[in-house]
Image (cartoon, coloured by chain):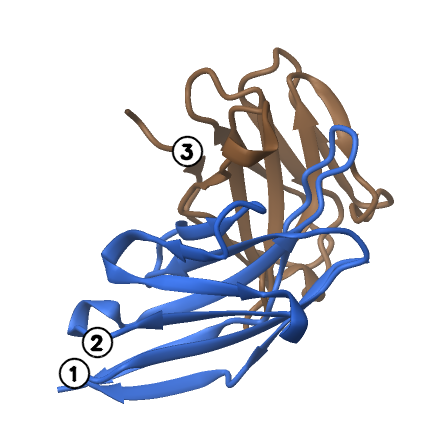
Amino acid sequence: AQSVTQLGSHVSVSEGALVLLRCNYSSSVPPYLFWYVQYPNQGLQLLLKYTSAATLVKGINGFEAEFKKSETSFHLTKPSAHMSDAAEYFCAVSAPRGGANNLFFGTGTRLTVIP
Amino acid sequence: EAGVAQSPRYKIIEKRQSVAFWCNPISGHATLYWYQQILGQGPKLLIQFQNNGVVDDSQLPKDRFSAERLKGVDSTLKIQPAKLEDSAVYLCASSLGGGWDTDTQYFGPGTRLTVL
């Protein structure tokens, strides 16, 4: 079975500060891992994904995440927060089998950026 | 390239009524997904289609929920009868459907359902 845990339902950072959103996963098979962002009244947009290639994954808008198997983690970071980064962020895991490609999402972390 | 389209965007009904949601995936995407996102939670998969066939509906409450994708393009999700706990945002997503390393799911804006 696959699942993810996102530590911290709300995170606040100052504009220009480091953004760190935490995600730990559980998977019985080698996982694929994803970070999605959701702006108010919009659908989810893919930020980045890990599919067993390089462990450091770079995404859009300056975000990156590092897959650490020993820690079962896939934390999302950005060196300098921008006001436009304020949104809800979801970590997700999948383990494609056969034709099914179910994404299992965490409960989300709401990022607030303080001017 | 047009994204995933969903309608209506908002729907308010009373319990025990019926409701239907529509989704038009990105052109050429073989795989279509319906997710339920309850307030304060992450999305949960309800059903996955590959073309017009069901791949995974293990989490679909089949006593009241149904979905179809008759021509392998548009899809409809129906709830009959609705319960209070069905209040949620219903998200549709689509993907090309081949090669897991590149098969990204693209999400529509969702339909927000309120059951009174």
Question: Is residue B43 placed above or below A21 in the rendered structure?
Answer: above
Total residue callouts = 3
Furthest residue in direction right, as rendered: B63
Judge whether A42 appears above or below B92 on screen: below
**Camera-side residue of B57 and A67:** A67
Please state the chain letter of the residue tagged with numbered disc 2 in the rendered image: A
Give the residue drawn at x 68%, y 17%.
Answer: B52
Residue bearing the label numbered 1: A15
Q: Are marks 3 and 1 on the same chain?
A: no
Residue corresponding to mark 3: B4
**Image: B28 above or below B82:** above
Q: Which mark is residue A81?
A: 2
State the separation of the CA atoms marked 1 and 2: 5 Å
Q: Measuring 78% from the left and 45% from the top, which residue is drawn there?
A: B60
Which chain wears brown?
B
Disc 1 residue type?
A: Glu
